[in-house]
Image (cartoon, rainbow, N blue to C red):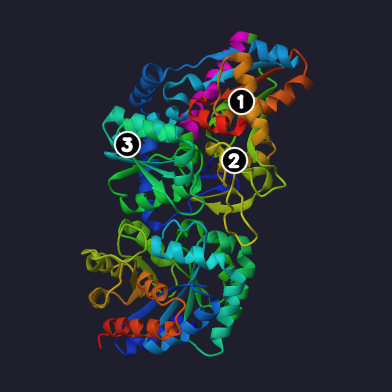
Amino acid sequence: MLPNKAGYFRNFGGKYVPETLMAALKELEAEYAKAKRDPKFRDELNGYLKDFAGRPTPLYFARRLTEKLNGAKIYLKREDLLHTGAHKINNTLGQLLLAKRMGKKRIIAETGAGQHGVATATAAALFGCECVVYMGEEDIRRQALNVFRMRLLGAKVVPVASGSKTLKDAINETLRDWVTNIRTTHYVLGSVVGPHPYPMMVRDFQLVIGKETRRQILKLEGKLPKYLVACVGGGSNSIGLFYPFFRDKKVGFIGVEAGGLGLSSSKHAASLLKGEIGILHGSKSYVLQNKDGQIDVTHSVSAGLDYPGVGPEHSYYKQIKRARYIAVNDKEALLGFKVLSETEGMIPALEPAHAVSHVLKLAPRLRKSDIIIICLSGRGDKDIDIVKDAIR
Amino acid sequence: MNRIKKTFNRLKREKKKAFIVYLTAGFPSLSETERIVPELEKAGADIIEIGVPFSDPMADGLTIQKSSEMSLKKGTTLKKILKTVRNIRRKSEIPIVLMSYLNPVYCYGMKDFVKEAAGCGVDGVIFPDLPPEEAAEIERRTKGKDFYIIFLASPTSTSGRLKLIARHSKGFIYYVSLTGITGARDRISPHIATNIRKIRRITDKPVCVGFGISTEKQARLVSKAADGVIVGSAVIDVINKNRGKKTLVKEVGKFASRLAKAVHNE
């Protein structure tokens, strides 16, 4: 079972953090291990996932998209239908229940697109906790709607002006807050990145996506899909979908990274395709960096994928070739956005629009008996302004 | 013998505490770093910490974030910093440790780093994001070499962790005075002395205290309990204020000499 005790997925992961955080990480690890075995914790979490978040989410047959592409049968895992509009709530409900167990009443989080910030603010409101969300100034500008939502939910949104003013800098700032307020505060990290136990714990909270999907597709089709396709920024929705199929060797995993303005430009966020192994935000994984080990400034039309690192478990999947990673650029993602809106009546977030866009190319090459499942990780309300500008 | 060890032996004989100064390498330029270090030695500094700038300094406050960013913009790299240390070594035998986030060193290659840093006259390295649990590789590279890895302890370290840190740390233990990031503060933590006593029960290695110490008064107070006092952001603030002036090196020296007197109880 991976990760091992030290938090490694073979060569990737670990705990590269300031000493001040070590005791808190150990506490979190111990508390999470206890909670995982506690039926009361599981029941409580499942209760909230069902009645508050709206699980299980449907696995929807995309009939018109399938007809249009005239190839494999396409299903959509509808995480976009969850409360708050994305899969992020699966993780924040779990972590807030943990924070409650640890007696920590102050919650901090980073956010890129704002979906994790909204999901954290929502869960914090639900449990009556103080909530502070760090967000890069650039992201505040491009995801203004989510900033307003967080504030409505009672969270304090702190703009981050350092570095590239996006997700990686928001994580730096949240870590700085955590080091300072470690005794009273729980850091709700939003993806399968960071030091152990986060990559494992966030995966565990997200694998409900894949578990449901596996059950649903077997019921609907009586067989497993040929491919699972999901976008990868830090990689939480994709790991959540992939992991329960890990032993189903015939099911292919395709992770779609943000190609930005193209992989040959320096303006993209394809850490697995173009990065080198390095240490960022507490773990060893693929990182976009220059030859001196300085972290690159990334670019993607989607704020949620605009990150120079990636979860260590994805690096492991790449190493053992369990998953294939490809990139979709901004323009192609916008096409995916448009096509799904018009053919299925679903406006996707720009992040899963990357996955949709890849399927536009993949599906026609497959047999009609093949099945592709896309993780529709979030809805696109937050992206309307960006898309409006991009189309213009 | 490692220069750090030699220095602590001397300080022990003189019944003095170590005054340690942190500088961001290449701020405002590497040639100025090269001139500031000997001036700091003259001013009474016992050990110099040279900070390797990193794009994502998660343990640092605004002062060091900004100085790092400016240094990187000027093209500072680990390789150039090592060359600067080599130049300083022509004039000075003051112990020099690098303080670097792990990634620039990891990217350089641990083996090459230890070999070349030691060859340039670096005495050791401090990684703010490397706990002893993850240090096996770099420690293996320093085996048989007179090159120290210095580990940090913090107010949240349990006694089990303090033992682990004391066992791994060479030269001295870097005690982080507070739960927080680097940067000047009005007040220092009232628990420093108590926490140092806790470490002393575990080890007889020197304990030096850093983070948040910026004034003579604070330095004097901390030096009563610790074996050394580390000042960083306050010195960088002085460098920043005198940036572009001919008097830069002198002003930094003046500021440092006041702090040195406080630490040395003169």
Task: Please give the chain letter of the residue carrying mark 2.
Answer: A
Which is more toward the observer, A168 or B188? Answer: A168
Q: Quick one: label 1 or label 3, which is nearer the N terminus?
A: 3
Q: Residues within 10 Å of mark 1 (few under 14, many from 20)?
A: many
Q: Are marks 2 and 1 in contact (CB under 8 Å)?
A: no
Residue A169 sits inside the magenta stretch: no
As for residue A211 lying within the magenta part, the answer is yes
Farthest residue in the left direction? B190
Give the residue number, with chain letter if any, for mark 1. Answer: A337
x then y, percent, for residue B171? 43, 75
Tag 3: residue type?
Ala
Residue carrying label 3 = A155
Range of magenta residues: A203-220
Q: Is residue A171 above or below residue B103?
A: above
Question: In the image, what residue occupies the spot 30% across and 27% down?
Answer: A126
Q: Is residue A284 left or right of residue A104?
A: right
**Of residues B240 and B263, which is closer to you in this image?**
B240
In contact (CB < 8 Å): disc 3 and disc 2: no
Which comes before the other along the chain, label 3 or label 2? 3
